[in-house]
Amino acid sequence: MDLFRYFKSIVDMDRCAVVICNLDHDIIYMNPAACARYVKWGGEELVGRTLLACHNAASRERIQQVIDWFRQSGDHNMIYTSRNEKENKDVYMVALRDEDGRLIGYYEKHEYRTAETEKLYDFKED
């Protein structure tokens, strides 16, 4: 079974932007929501570029502090990084680890706090 297909599908179907980076801060993957969200900065063309170019010096320093913290312990896997009141969401950085627990990268996780407005099991016709 090709688990990669399933995991990629989970990320691709997420309504939130998911930008995955390696430990060199290279953007290695952006889901469709991220490509759309960051289109004015290049969208899908950001893949292969450094995430650090999208941030100011203070943010770059914070990102490195988080990576250093992730490296300190296999128990350090998620940290709250910001609140966006306009979009009613909290933002976290999440460690990505291999099957042996080694840090291999990170991504930013957005959690919206606005209650869902759709009806339960609303099977819409297209």
Image (tube, rainbow, N blue to C red):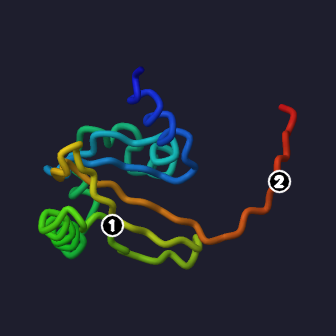
Where does residue 96 sit, x and y in percent of width and height? 27, 51
Q: With 125 as the anchor, is 14 left or right in this view? A: left
Residue bearing the label numbered 1:
78
Please name the residue shown 21% across and 76% down the image. Answer: 58
Residue 98 location, quadrant: top left
Q: Secondary structure at mark 2?
A: loop
Image check: 56 left or right of 109?
A: left
Query: Which of the pair 114/27 is nearer the observer?
Result: 114
* Up-down relation of residue 20 to residue 85 (above or below): above
Q: Earlier in the sequence, mark 2 or mark 1?
A: 1
Residue 103 pos. (x, y %): 18, 53
Image disc number at residue 120? 2
The residue shown at (33%, 71%) is 79
Are there few (<14), some (14-19), or many (20+) residues within 10 Å of tag 2?
few
Q: Quadrant of the C terminus?
A: top right
Q: Label 1 sits on what residue type? A: Met
Gap between marks 2 and 1 measured at Cα = 31 Å
